[in-house]
Amino acid sequence: MNEVGALWRFILRRKGLSATLNGLFLALPIALVAWRASLSQDTQLEAGEIYGALIGPIILSGMLPFLTLLVMLPLTVEPFERGTATYLLSRPLPRWKVVLGFYLGGISAMAIPLAIGALAPAAILWPSTPDTLSLTKKVLGLTSVALLGALPYGALTLLLGTAIRKPLLWSLALVVGWGSVAGSITGPLRATSPHRYLHSLLRKWCDVPNTWEGLGKTFSIPDLTPPGTILSLTVILGSSAVFLFFAWKGIQRRDII
């Protein structure tokens, strides 16, 4: 496993700084939304309600998918374009170690900006709430959900990058379209998307009501039959494992010329 650790550290060093800068760029509008909502006299929402019902869905449906594309997609495209893959795949190194090292490095790089995205709006809302403990629990809950969400979407993007030569359009369609959009609205694809199960965990861990009351109360469309915590975790972790397996199969078939 030394090779996996070496690739992990290499990817984290290579992508960590750019991922953090991208995270700051994406977190800025989220923090502005929190600031504007905290000043609004129309909604009269408490800080905890703003954070869970408004900021949570923005991070899951906006920040998470695009950060995944910004971090994970180049990990699989650039090595083949620049010739790094030729070196890696021609070495006596099992290809599953290459996939796992790239995956762990990419997820670790994503973890930094996702944590920033969860903490930035909370820093604005903490002074305006007397119940800091409740808001802190919601911050931990949203951070956990966002990091869990990075697992299936990171693995899916890695799969597309290793199995398809032009993965950009497929990544946009699946990560953004099938994941963020279809998983957040009603329709037959909702139950198949990891996003539905992330929203279920968000509702439970951040105390978000499963009702539709318009922008400001709940930003996501309610799920009439929301899955439980065990099922949600099983789907998220299980789909991540399945995507990684097919990423390994895809890179086994990938030539290096």
Image (tube, rainbow, N blue to C red):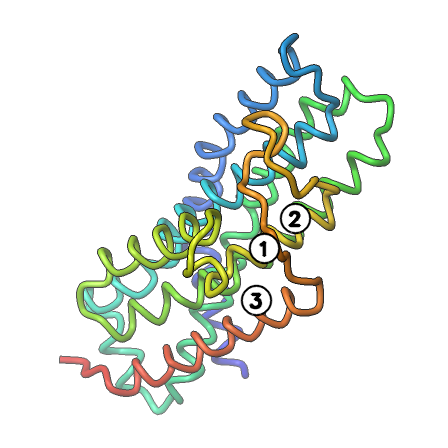
Q: Residues within 10 Å of mark 3 (few under 14, many from 20)?
A: many
22 and 215: which is toward the camera: 215
The image shows residue 217 at horizontal and vertical percentages of 63, 28
Determine the CA span between mark 2 and mark 1. Answer: 6 Å
Q: Residue 202's mark?
A: 2
The disc labelled 3 sits on which kind of residue? Answer: Ile
Q: Which residue is label 3 attached to?
A: 236
Q: Residue drawn 37% across and 77% down? A: 247
5 and 195: which is toward the camera: 195
Q: Is residue 66 above or below residue 242?
A: above
Q: Is residue 44 left or right of residue 220?
A: right
- How many marks on residues? 3
Q: Is residue 236 above or below residue 74?
A: below
Q: Quadrant of residue 170?
A: bottom left
The image shows residue 73 at horizontal and vertical percentages of 32, 58
Which quarter of the image is occupied by the N terminus? Answer: bottom right
Between discs 1 and 3, the one toward the N terminus:
1
81 and 217: which is toward the camera: 217
Q: Are marks 2 and 1 in contact (CB under 8 Å)?
A: yes
Determine the CA span between mark 1 and mark 3. Answer: 8 Å
- Determine whether the residue tagged by mark 2 lies in a helix, strand or loop: helix
The disc labelled 2 sits on which kind of residue? Answer: Leu
The disc labelled 1 sits on which kind of residue? Answer: Leu
Q: Which residue is label 1 attached to?
A: 198
Q: Are marks 1 and 3 in contact (CB under 8 Å)?
A: yes
Q: Is residue 32 above or below residue 254?
A: above
